[in-house]
Amino acid sequence: MAKSGSGAGPKTRSDGAAIEPERLRFPARLDAKAKIEHLAKKTIAMARREVDPYVDIPSRTLSNVTFSKRRKIIEMGDATQRRTLFNLNQARKYMQTLLVARGCSQLLDEQKTTSIRDLYYMSKHTLADGRENTFEGQEESDPIIEDLEVTLGALREELHLFAAKRGSAVGPLTLVDAGDVIDLSRMGSGGWSVPGIVEPGTIRFVGHGARFILLVEKEAVWARLNEDKFWRRHNCILVTGQGQPSRGVRRLLYRMVDELKLPLYVFVDNDPWGYYIHSVVKQGSIGLAFESKRMAVPRARFIGLSSFDPGNYDLSEDVSIRLNDQDRSRAREILNYEWFKAKPWQKEIRNMLRSGVKWELEALSSKGISFVTEEFLPRKIADRDWI
């Protein structure tokens, strides 16, 4: 087999034209373990045929996503980037991809889960007779993990990997978490800590008395609602993602909406970043467009803060924050996203830009420490005042 740097070129036809290797695909019917085995077998077969081993990585860019008006989610296109072994600019990443795949295969074989940090250390070592490391830092391995999951069409969690836990939930819901029965109405001030992996094999719902789910961007506001027992008075499941929801929180929300048949309301800051948090929950994200069908909740409702709420609820300008250049730039950017083209969203975002200010959820406390619990949210829900 030709070695790196030998100058070996691609296979050619009799007329001299290059033969483009077929795209490396992974049948959807296979589970994560079988897909990794498929990758290994294809790699060995290419080496035996003296074909430059390669893997096709779907492109996770805005140019390779579309918004499905029928399904109302962001979907990934067909564009890929080929990563080959004998291309000196790609050889390192190619080998890193196989190292990560080997680490995931080991986890699946042993039926164990680990963090993406642990996988970095499992895959890191110094190459024999040299000083070069397989990975110089986790900033190298994390993107490779994302490349592998999008290539295989398997969630990171299906590869038995999780990121740091972030998010809490409380309310009238009973579930089984790794064999333990947990009543989310008896979790105290901190709530139930949402795990990194919430797949059906780990988390199972066994009963609930909820009317809806409320996702709250800010942990401090979630804590206020929990302390005031908003979830008990209004029979809801109260969830916080502590900012942009983690994958575990997004997947949990999807499962609760899909399996428990509950509506989802999203309560975020009135700024471009809050708008985008809602859109990620509702339509999916560009980076994870290949898994929107298992994470996005198209029926999710934006319940506030709206740029019209300060006027409707007589909030003082003293608790507003002026938009900066980054805010304005981001607002104009999302105005052009296909999934923000609906008239209510165009009206909402343009009104924020026209006002020149943004509002954090905590601004509602200027009307009273429990104003959000006792007046704002009950009225918004009763009036069906959402987008």
Image (spheres, grey):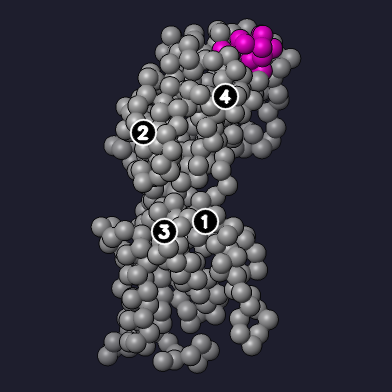
Q: Which mark is residue 114?
A: 1
Q: Is residue 242 left or right of residue 211?
A: right
Dot 2 or dot 3: first in sequence order is 3
Residue ID for mark 2:
205
**Closer-to-camera residue (21/231):** 231
Question: Vertically, is 3 above or below 207?
Answer: below
Of the residues shown, which amino acid type is indicated by label 1?
Thr
Instruction: Estimate the x, y position of residue 357 in percent, counting from the top left.
Output: 66, 23
Q: Is residue 263 left or right of residue 7?
A: left
Dominant SS in magenta? helix
Residue at (37, 53) in percent of width and height:
77
Helix, strand or loop under label 1? strand
Instruction: Estimate the x, y position of residue 280 in percent, counting from the top left.
Output: 47, 38
* Whether residue 345 can be seen here: no
Residue ID for mark 4:
188
Distance between the Cα atoms at labels 4 and 1? 28 Å
Q: Which quadrant does the C terminus fall into? A: top left
Question: Do the CB atoms of the residues marked 4 and 1 lie less than 8 Å apart?
Answer: no
Distance between the Cα atoms at labels 2 and 4? 20 Å
Dot 1 or dot 2: first in sequence order is 1
Of the residues shown, which amino acid type is indicated by label 4?
Gly
Q: Categorize mark 4 by other alpha carbons within 10 Å: few (<14), some (14-19), many (20+).
A: few
Question: Do the CB atoms of the residues marked 2 and 3 lie less than 8 Å apart?
Answer: no
Dot 4 or dot 1: first in sequence order is 1
Residue 370 is inside the magenta segment: yes
* Whether residue 192 can be seen here: yes
Question: Vertically, is 234 above or below 61?
Answer: above
Question: Do the CB atoms of the residues marked 2 and 4 lie less than 8 Å apart?
Answer: no
Residue ID for mark 3:
111
Instruction: Estimate the x, y position of residue 97 in percent, counting from the top left.
Output: 48, 69
Of the residues shown, which amino acid type is indicated by label 2?
Phe
Question: Vertically, is 37 above or below 257?
Answer: below
